[in-house]
Amino acid sequence: MSIHYSRRRVLLHWLSAAIILWALASGFYVAFNPVSASTEHWVGSLNVSLTTLFIPFFLWRAWLFVCEQKSRGAALAGDKRLAFAVHALIYLVIGVVLVTGVLMMKSAINVFGLVRFPQPLADPVLIELANTVHALSCMVLSLLVALHLCAVLWHELSGRRVVRRMFFAKPAGTLQ
Ligand code: HEM
Ligand code: HEM
């Protein structure tokens, strides 16, 4: 079966990829390297704003993914089933990263100075737990992204042009 992604699916994929790769790389860089307090502050507030703004886009994208599975109906063949399982796992782990990111906040969530959401939890033990799960799920997500990139590379080297179909959306017969 040949898959074509719709324009919004393609745009959402690259928007998500850019935000997630940036948040993972900069978040781990700041966590594991000696950086100045001002760098830590601007990276922290930029990432909280950016990733909070990303939440509705993620929900939209996850919804399109669920609709695709519903409309497909029939069982998938071997390698397609593996790809589906990894993609579903990526969505699940991104969901955990987003929820725990929000729950670990020790101050109000300030989105680019435009909107403020109150700090959701007060109990320091629960905040610490969310922090631990956030860091662990970010590590799992990094491994899944590395696996995803290896799979994309492997398909391309085997002559299957998967990157092309994630760039050029087809108007007819597309996935949502
Ligand atoms: C795509 C989603 C996200 C990714 C990939 C991501 C990634 C990361 C990474 C890699 C770290 C460093 C982990 C460590 O300490 O080892 C981090 C820390 C953090 N994240 Fe996230 N995050 C995301 C979403 C969020 C959201 C939605 C919030 C809150 C609204 C948030 C708040 C924080 C905070 C407060 C820290 C700790 C910063 C510090 O210790 O100074 N994150 N994040
Ligand atoms: C430069 C980095 C990336 C490249 C080159 C890339 C490439 C691709 C390609 C070619 C596909 C289509 C695969 C197919 O149709 O079989 C795809 C799908 C997908 N990618 Fe990526 N990707 C990148 C980054 C990411 C990141 C960071 C994530 C999430 C953390 C991600 C999540 C997904 C998911 C979930 C799909 C399944 C289709 C969908 O639900 O939209 N990708 N990617």
Image: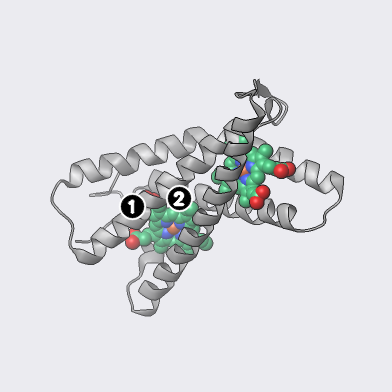
Q: Is residue 70 above or below residue 159?
A: above
Q: Which residue is denoted by mark 2 in the rendering?
A: 13
Mark 2: give few (<14), some (14-19) or many (20+) Cα within 10 Å.
some
Find residue 18 and report its horizontal and vertical position in percent: 57, 52
In the picture as drawn, the residue positioned furthest to the left comes out as: 74
Residue 1 falls left or right of residue 174: left
Position of the C terminus by quadrant: top left
Label 1 CB less than 8 angstroms from ligand 2: yes
Q: The residue tagged with tag 2: helix, strand or loop? A: helix
Q: Quadrant of ligand 2?
A: bottom left
In the picture as drawn, the residue positioned furthest to the front comes out as: 125
Label 2 CB less than 8 angstroms from ligand 2: yes
Residue 148 falls left or right of residue 158: right
Q: Which residue is denoted by mark 1 in the rendering?
A: 5
* Residue type pointed to by label 1: Tyr
Position of the N terminus by quadrant: bottom left
* Residue type pointed to by label 2: His
State yes or no: discs 2 and 1 in contact (Cβ < 8 Å): yes
Residue in view at x 86 percent, y 50 percent: 36
| Residue 75 seen anywhere in this rendered image of the structure | yes
Residue in view at x 36 percent, y 72 percent: 155
